[in-house]
Amino acid sequence: MKIYKIPEATVMRLSIYSRYLYQLAGDGVETISSGEIARGVGVSSAQVRKDLAYFGEFGTRGVGYNVDDLYGHVMKILGLDKMWNVIIIGAGKLGSALALYKGFVKRGFNISAILDADQGKIGTELEKVVVEPMDVLAERVKEHNVNIGIITVPTISAQEVTDKLVAAGVKAILNFSPRVLNVPSDVILRNVDLSVHLEVLSFKLDYQG
Amino acid sequence: MKIYKIPEATVMRLSIYSRYLYQLAGDGVETISSGEIARGVGVSSAQVRKDLAYFGEFGTRGVGYNVDDLYGHVMKILGLDKMWNVIIIGAGKLGSALALYKGFVKRGFNISAILDADQGKIGTELEKVVVEPMDVLAERVKEHNVNIGIITVPTISAQEVTDKLVAAGVKAILNFSPRVLNVPSDVILRNVDLSVHLEVLSFKLDYQG
């Protein structure tokens, strides 16, 4: 198996399958076919089978998949059979919204710390996390064994913050700033542009509407 | 051309190509090959050619693509050669962050109105938009010719808000709440779960790290 060649779109679909399987398990459903998963999440059943086939054989021909088992497998594939510690840099509206976002902890992402350079924001409580100054970055990363950094600072500070996260040993960065960031090759960088979601809608409105 | 069969992943990549082409045009680059686009955005050049081929012939063999022309074509494909009017329902941290998000207006998405059921939030100014009560929903949708609704309300109110947007004639909805929403078949619904972005990182940390 060449795990490292899994397309990112497959990973994102696995994430969607896992949510659907969780819901089914909650409803007491025991087995499900690829066709039913496909209908439930809105992709083709061939796509479901292809996505799952990257990771080996799960189902039983003619019976389908055991919901609990498949859910466990998919969560393990996604690395969600453990907790990940996350630090947020930037306690503006977006950073605060992310710190309070209930979806993260449900999926195993624990917000360990949130930092900001603005004295006015330091000390603000966001549920159980308090906004702290930038100079505790390295200390918090080490103390909480932080795996992932989320950047929600203004464009002008984004590279400086990235360099600090990298220097502190953070190996994965989720960047919400519009700035193109440079990271060493052993650091995983993912840029999030929230307008992409709107663009899928504008595309569909234009062509299908 | 079967435009309606374009995979969503292709639309999302077109969105990424357009940002790169915009940057190149700003740097004065006049022509570019599919290989250069591929390296610039981190996909294969075969993928770039395949994505663009859905929409006809753009490049010149041996010369590549004219950057300005291709940018214009891709923006038109994405429906971004016009402005789209957006209403946000829910002025909590996430709704406010989205109302202030600079990336939207740059790509042609204009936040026309933001509504909330909480009296305490009504009247708050988010740049040029003021939070208004829920009962002006239908009026604002009509007045601003709103095409897209963004839902950032708590789970419990999400379906009710969706029904109101649909009744007001909104044809595309971006849902940030974790609730599975029901919409008529002529309404385009897209669910955004921000943890998906973290899950791509946890997957990669687990398998490549």
Image (tube, coloured by chain):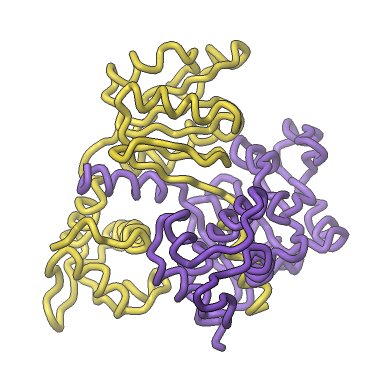
Chain colours: A purple, B yellow
Residue sitting at 64 percent across and 78 percent down?
A: B207
Please tell me whether residue A14 is drawn above or below residue B181 in the rendered image.
Answer: below
Residue A21, quarter of picture: bottom right
Q: Is residue B52 found left or right of A165 in the rendered image?
A: left
Which sits in the foreground, B147 or B98? Answer: B147
Q: Is residue A113 found left or right of B10 in the rendered image?
A: right
Q: Residue furthest right?
A: A143
Please tell me whether residue B179 is drawn above or below residue B143 in the rendered image.
Answer: below
Q: Position of residue A110 (x, y in %)?
A: 76, 52
Q: Quadrant of the C terminus of chain B?
A: bottom right
Q: Position of residue A25 (x, y in %)?
A: 65, 55
Q: Position of residue B150 (x, y in %)?
A: 44, 34
Residue sitting at 69 percent across and 39 percent down?
A: A100
Residue B64, quarter of picture: bottom left
| Total tally of numbered discs in the picture | 0
Which sits in the foreground, B161 or A67? Answer: A67
Residue sitting at 39 percent across and 32 percent down?
A: B149
Q: Residue furthest bottom?
A: A1
Q: Position of residue B196 (x, y in %)?
A: 57, 56
Residue sitting at 17 percent across and 67 percent down?
A: B66
Please tell me whether residue B10 is drawn above or below residue A202 in the rendered image.
Answer: below
Please tell me whether residue A200 is drawn above or below residue B51 in the rendered image.
Answer: above
Q: Is residue A3 found left or right of B86 in the rendered image?
A: right
Q: Is residue A55 found left or right of B181 in the rendered image?
A: right
Q: Quadrant of the N terminus of chain B?
A: bottom left
